[in-house]
Image (tube, rainbow, N blue to C red):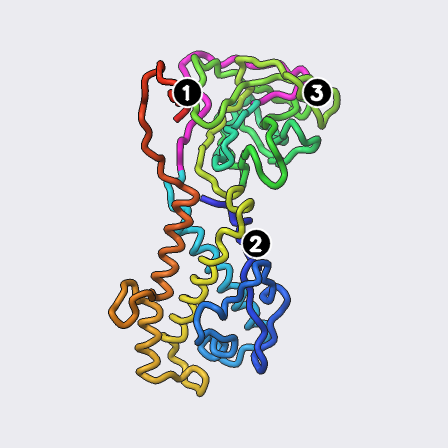
Amino acid sequence: MYRTEVISKLFGRVGWRQEAGAPVVDSANLASKSKRYFQGAHSIISLKRIKETAGEVNMNDAAFNALLKTMQESSIAAVLDGVFNQSEIIEQRLEFDVCDQEPVLIENSGLFVGRKIKVSSNAARSVRVNAISLYFNGAGTFNIYLFNSLKKLPIKTLEVTTEADSIVVVEPDDWILNYMDGGVKSGVFYIGYFQSDLVGVKAYDQRPWSWICANCYRSDAIEAEAPTATDFVRTNPPITSRTYGLNIEFSSVNDYTEVIKQNPQAFDTAIGLQMGAMVVEQIMNSVRSNGTERISKEQAHQLYIDLNLEKMTEELPFSTGLKGQLNREMKRLNLNFFPKEKPFTITSPNDPCYTPRFNR
């Protein structure tokens, strides 16, 4: 998977070249950080032809630029979907199974309580907070916070309302814990609440027999001193066995957002080819009738060949269609980001060339 923020990161890597007599293209669609232009994919591609074969008739410049924006975003998404097509979900777990022991009420002591979460240092892994189960002895409204050890203010805040002696499940929106992203580099995460915010309610300790182990993160219950109502001591907060009324459901996922953001230039060729194939298909399938879009049967046949040819012929021994070029580029990108492991030979430890292999 990848988060939608990468679309804007790649937007403008390839752009449109303004043409004489064509609709006026805005600066966002003209931007080309790679100095490559979509018209280079095929000679038939032009701004005027795109406009005259679009579904909307007589669109103004604003509508036309909105169309170009949508087409570029669609091209970027199609390329990323084709390259990063590995399995997404790695694991999905609760922190613990509820046992048959009688839960115990926890007195409020003015602490910040909750969880300390250490996530994998793999940049292509993320941990999602799917849901938080709340178990308290009364109805109360307070905030659950997501902090990082390297940021003073909370990253996320969620207002919750509990029920008396009944589990309430809340689903945070877009709580993603990543070792490296645009706002956080390294550090550990904290999810919890300030006991000073609880008015007339107390949390239950469900006393689980054991906590469920995960592959891509570790979650420990903590109880940290809170010198103020909005901050807590984050240096080595005491680990506890008490659940403090919380049981969090996490998912570990393959997340290539940061990998994509740090290597935007890798996708320039594929995005240009994807746009080229999209425009050629639009021209071929247009049902509009006007002087610009009208093409002969011979032209239509040649466009079909230019788009779909995927093998060498005696006439064109070194040519391939746009889709063939795109497919080849997508395979190259996939192999670049997911290289196949090379075979290796295990030699004797007594051999001077012997090198132990760890963490394969």
Q: Quadrant of the N terminus?
A: top left
**Label located before the other in sequence (2 or 1):** 2
| Neighbours of disc 3 within 10 Å: few (<14), some (14-19), many (20+) | some
Name the secondary structure under disc 3.
loop
Residues at marks 3 and 2, CA–CA distance in whole angstroms: 39 Å
Report the residue that reaches farthest toward the front. 352
Q: Quadrant of the C terminus?
A: top left
Q: Residue 270 vs residue 324: left or right?
A: right
Residue 314 position by quadrant? bottom left
Q: Are marks 1 and 3 in contact (CB under 8 Å)?
A: no
Position of residue 205 measured from the top left corner of the image (x, y, whole percent): 52, 16
The residue that mark 3 highlights is 226
**Label located before the other in sequence (3 or 2):** 2
Image depth: mark 3 or mark 2 in front: 2
- The residue located at (55%, 37%) in the rendering is 175
Position of residue 203 measured from the top left corner of the image (x, y, whole percent): 57, 20
- The residue located at (59%, 58%) in the rendering is 33
| Neighbours of disc 2 within 10 Å: few (<14), some (14-19), many (20+) | few
Residue 139 position by quadrant? top right
- The residue located at (35%, 39%) in the rendering is 340
- In the picture, the disc for residue 8 is 2
- The residue located at (46%, 75%) in the rendering is 54
The verdict on residue 140 being magenta is no
The residue that mark 1 highlights is 97
Residue 244 higher or lower than 251, as above or below: above
Give, as a three-letter code, the residue at label 2.
Ser
Give, as a three-letter code, the residue at label 1.
Asp
The verdict on residue 112 being magenta is yes
Residue 344 position by quadrant? top left
**Residue interval drawn in magenta:** 89-115
Residues at marks 2 and 1, CA–CA distance in whole angstroms: 41 Å
